[in-house]
Image (spheres, rainbow, N blue to C red):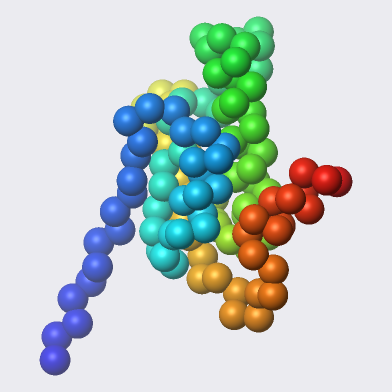
Amino acid sequence: MFMGKTPFITVRASRPLSEIEFCAWVAQAAPGDRLEYHRGYLVLDTYPLFSALDDKARGELARLAARAFWAAEQGLVHLVQARVGPDRFAYIAVARPKPKAAAVSLSALLLDAQAA
């Protein structure tokens, strides 16, 4: 039987994602699913002096970036970058297998993180 290779498909949002939308994706993503959560230069896009974003959009992007990093620290995703042009990158979250011994749901982890 021939086992073909499955191509990696990255979902790219047509508009900026919110932190909540990112969390919803993490909760339902299958291992290997890929989500492009930002395109640009993240460190500059969240910095007031260099960003073209308004305060509200910049704040939401900073929360999204922090949540993506948190998800990586929890072992829920891998974070990778792909260069798409000069000083422009695609920031991608790749879903990892969910821990089998997880006695705590993602929503409980989120609540614990907010309380801290």
Report whether 73 appears left or right of 114: left
Q: Residue furthest left?
A: 1
> Can residue 80 be seen at all in this image of the molecule?
no
Report whether 9 appears left or right of 30: left
The residue under the point 63% across, 59% down is 106
Q: Nearer the viewer, residue 81 or 104?
A: 104
- The mark total stands at 0
The image shows residue 30, relative to residue 63, as above or below, that is: below
The residue under the point 51% across, 71% down is 97
The image shows residue 74, relative to residue 1, as above or below, that is: above
Report whether 87 appears left or right of 14: right
Instruction: Please state the horizontal and vertical placement of residue 61, each as a whole percent of the image.
Output: 57, 27
Quadrant in which the N terminus appears: bottom left
Q: Nearer the viewer, residue 34 or 50?
A: 34
Q: Residue furthest right?
A: 116
Kindly indicate the quadrant of the structure image that contains residue 49.
top right
Instruction: Please state the horizontal and vertical placement of residue 7, each as a whole percent of the image.
Output: 25, 61
The image shows residue 54, relative to residue 80, as above or below, that is: above
> Can residue 30 be seen at all in this image of the molecule?
yes
Kindly indicate the quadrant of the structure image that contains residue 42.
top right
The residue under the point 51% across, 65% down is 96
The residue under the point 24% across, 68% down is 6
Q: Nearer the viewer, residue 27 or 48?
A: 27
Instruction: Please state the horizontal and vertical placement of residue 51, each as a whole percent of the image.
Output: 57, 12
The image shows residue 104, relative to residue 61, as above or below, that is: below
